[in-house]
Image: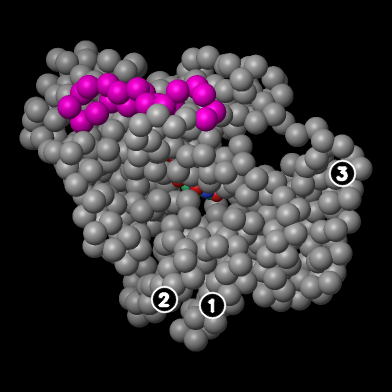
Amino acid sequence: MVAEKLYENLATLLGEGTISRTSGDIQEHGQDESAHTGHLPDVVVWPRNRQDVQAVVGWANEHHVPVTAWGAGTSVEGNPIPVQGGIVLDFREMNEILAIHETDFQVTVQPGVLYKDMNRKLGKLGLFFAPDPGANASIGGMIANNAAGVRTVKYGATKDNVLALEVVLANGEVVHTGSRSPKQSSGYDLTHLFAGSEGTLGIITEATLQLAPLPEHYSAAVAAFPEVAQAADAIYRIMACGLEPSAMEILDTYCVHLLNREEHLGLEETPTIIMEFCDASVSGLEERLTMVEEICRDVGCMTFDSGVGRDERARLWEARHRLFEILVRSHPGQTWILSDMGVPISAFPEMVHRARELSEAAGVKGVINGHAGDGNIHATYFFPPEDLETRAKVERVVGDLTETALTLGGTSTGEHGVGLGKQKFMVREHGTEGVALMKSLKATLDPNNILNPGKIF
Ligand SMILES: Cc1cc2nc3c(=O)[nH]c(=O)nc-3n(C[C@H](O)[C@H](O)[C@H](O)COP(=O)(O)OP(=O)(O)OC[C@H]3O[C@@H](n4cnc5c(N)ncnc54)[C@H](O)[C@@H]3O)c2cc1C
């Protein structure tokens, strides 16, 4: 359907003011934060409530027009790029916290609520939503991608903290999944079918989330190692001892160098682990930190600093969250390929070793960092867009690395989702039968293939 006609139809349905086809709005919704090729939608709609979503989706289904949900557009795998055009549903206006169930540590929100804004409000009540992707993502986008982050090692990924959803299906009908009970074993787990489905099975219009109390006593610690392999080994040992960090990040020398340069952290420029521990008592916290230091020194760390105070801790994590932006900024005019493998924790040192070995063998420079405590490693490769030879090498390395992760019992994507970049690994990871089952679920829930078409498969 031509864009003008589409606009007219939607304006009749919703009234003007919530729809746009101006060049600025269209451009803004054609590209996420990834280096994947963008694609413009025909029309952008800002729904005000669930009824607007139902009206648009129901109409689009009848007329076979693609509908792609849009949260904050911070994805790094092309997840919200409307590759077949049509309608983008931007949830910016549906950004209310509907209820805080303070005594149950829960919150019910609209999908456009931004993660950091929500946590600022919850912090006043001593509560927070733990999955922390770093970017100020929307809750809808986080659920749809099953985002994770630095605190997943203790609190789980987004999916693990979603209790109930309101979802508009492709035919415009509404389903309510889950409940506010922390334990649920009633029927098929529809909540977690929609979570992680990247907007391809239904549109989330409301979510109830599990929160956590802000920890009473906590401390960050930083350990510097001569080699990345030793850092990886220390991570495995800390996890194996059950010391339960609330964050455990690995950075290679280059990442530390960039953070020093841009954020003035003054860290030793060698492979480094940044971690955080919390406890109900000061003595418990100190005991943990002593054991962690012993492990790090045993493995050969050069420096260990655990007296990181509140302000310094905040500065450290803010800087860590900016790492991806800093990396991109430090390679002007270059494109990149970002891998996101996840492996069982015992395989983490092996994965780090292979990432270095394969990159060196291919003659390409991979920047290594990761949410190491949960086995998640990113190797990122930068190169000029016109350098097809390097691109081919990088693609081979990322393919080999993913193959390694899968052989070690892991996954091709620990947190960024399949989007456009990880589609080529789906059959290898899930088998033809697994992918066929996913496709049949998609066909059942979205027979006209209108919801974020061209993704996952
Ligand atoms: C600097 C930086 C650091 C990052 N670090 C991390 C990290 O540590 N961990 C991590 O996991 N990710 C990270 N990301 C990626 C990104 O923040 C996450 O993938 C996040 O979940 C995207 O949320 P969003 O609101 O921006 O969603 P969008 O990018 O707008 O959309 C994401 C997906 O959700 C779908 N969607 C959006 N809203 C809805 C809805 N209401 N219903 C159904 N589907 C919907 C979209 O169609 C799309 O498929 C980072 C990104 C940046 C830029």
Instruction: Point out the quarter of the image occupied by ligand 1.
Output: top left
Identified by mark 3, the residue type is: Gly
Tell me if residue 330 can be seen.
no
Mark 3, mark 1: which one is toward the viewer?
A: 3
Q: Residue at x 35, y 80 (%)?
A: 389
Q: Would you place residue 287 above or below residue 174 in this image?
A: below
Query: Within the image, what quadrant is residue 304 found in?
Result: bottom right
Q: Would you place residue 307 above or below residue 165 in this image?
A: below
Identified by mark 2, the residue type is: Asp
Please give the residue where the numbered disc 3 appears in the rendered image. 284
Query: Within the image, what quadrant is residue 68 found in?
Result: top left
CA distance separating discs 2 and 3:
43 Å
Disc number placed over residue 275 in the picture, else none: none
Front residue of 377 and 386: 377
Q: Quadrant of the N terminus?
A: top left
Q: Would you place residue 150 above or below residue 428 in this image?
A: above
Q: Quadrant of the C terminus?
A: bottom left
Does the segment drawn in magenta span residue 194? no
Please give the residue where the numbered disc 1 appears in the rendered image. 354
Please give the residue where the numbered disc 2 appears in the rendered image. 400
For the record, the magenta segment spans: 164-183
Q: Is residue 72 left or right of residue 64?
A: right
Identified by mark 1, the residue type is: Arg
Q: Closer to the N terminus: mark 1 or mark 2? A: 1
Q: Residues within 10 Å of mark 1 (few under 14, many from 20)?
A: some
